[in-house]
Amino acid sequence: MTDQTLTPGPTADNPADDEISLLDLLQVVVDNLRLLVLGPLAVGLVALGIAFAIPPTFTAKVQFIPPKQQQSTAAAALSDLGILGGAAGAVAGIKNPADQYAALAKSVSVADALSTQFKLAERYDETLKQKIRKELADNTRIAVGAKDGLISIEVDDQDPQLAADMANAYVVELRKLLNRVALTESQQRRVFFERMVTEAKANMVRAELALKASGVDSASLKVSAQSSLEGVARLKAQISVQEVKLAALRGYLADTAPEFKQALNELAALRAQMERADRGEDVSSGQSDYVARFREFKYQEALYSLYMRQFEVARVDESREGAVIQVVDPAEKPERKSKPKKALVAVLATLASGFALLLFVFVRNAMQNTATDPQAAAKLVRLRQGWARALGKN
């Protein structure tokens, strides 16, 4: 018996279809070469012509440095308030403060201000504010630099000068918005003490009116000297401040903390002094009304003076920190359009149409081959019937 190498040849189950299929595909491409070349070129030329007909869009860009959120340097000046000054201005930690300013630039307040200033309702041919805001947002890109922290605002418009004006207007409106909201530590302290000054002033005026209504007589002044009353008033004000200090400490310290215990002991000592001062007063019923009102007036006056000093300190800190936006590169009138990019449009249209035509040629060739194969034709008929039933046409 002679050894023979068994090499399976092409059979019905194992045909050498790979080479034949590739050759067939290449043959289909060659047969339709003119369509596959001239068709995409024609589409690319048409797309290029359409790109020339589209009005050009210009992009203006402004870059600025957002305000820095600094910690307060007035801790020494706030020693008479203890923890009150720090508690009044505590600001929640933010991973990237620049993101907050970018979000404010995207706010409805800024968008509506720009819409009014540049009459965007007429320019965008829209009447609903929501649609105007959306159109403005689509034409605006606000981003924060990952490394440098700069905020950039890009505005698209068919008018290059208007694009530059709108980009710069974003910065102006953002500054106005920052004047209305308190973001930094010094701003929040200023807002807090401003509110306390207003309340203390109103209370002081009411106490003064009540004092005048009680009348002043020499006997009252002899029984309770003014210096004594002022001392009691200051002591009462210190107790109020210490109570606020304890309330602030409870927010982040346990009751067993040494600092909390010390503040509690100081409050107890102040209250003990107040009790001794109250027991030391010896006034008649007719004089006690004037004395109580005079002491209340001095107490409100001391609080007003205290809060007013801290309000001025907060204003100085805010002016030094100066929640000021520093513009690095103001937006200028763009000299070249940003879109449409005619060459890119033509290339993409050519490639897309070439791929579509190639797919069309292959599908058409497959359909033609199917028509000559009875078995494939029967499958195609069943496929069409099943499709018709699915659509409810059968």
Image (tube, helix red, strand yellow):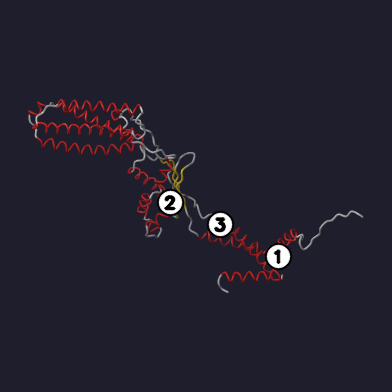
Tag in front: 1 or 3: 1
Which residue type does callout 1 highlight?
Asp
User: Relative to the observer, which residue lies in front, 56 or 35?
Assistant: 35
Q: Quadrant of residue 64?
A: top left
Which residue type does callout 3 highlight?
Val
Instruction: Report x, y in % for residue 301.
Output: 20, 33
Q: How many marks?
A: 3
Residue 351's tag is none
Residue 31's tag is 1
Locate residue 276 relative to residue 392 in the image: left or right.
Answer: left
Which is nearer the N-term, disc 2 or disc 1?
1
Q: Compared to 332, does 148 lie above or below?
A: above
Instruction: Report x, y in % for residue 91.
Output: 37, 37
The residue lying at 40 percent from left, 43 percent from top is 101
Which residue is label 3 attached to? 345
Locate residue 21 relative to residue 267 in the image: left or right.
Answer: right
Which is nearer the N-term, disc 3 or disc 2?
2
Secondary structure beneath dot 2 equals helix
Locate residue 371 relative to residue 352 in the image: left or right.
Answer: right
Tell me if label 1 and label 3 are in contact, CB under 8 Å. no
Residue 163's tag is 2
User: Relative to the observer, which residue lies in front, 123 or 250?
Assistant: 250
Q: Compared to 377, does 91 lie above or below?
A: above
Instruction: Report x, y in % for residue 15.
Output: 77, 61
Farthest-out residue, bottom: 394
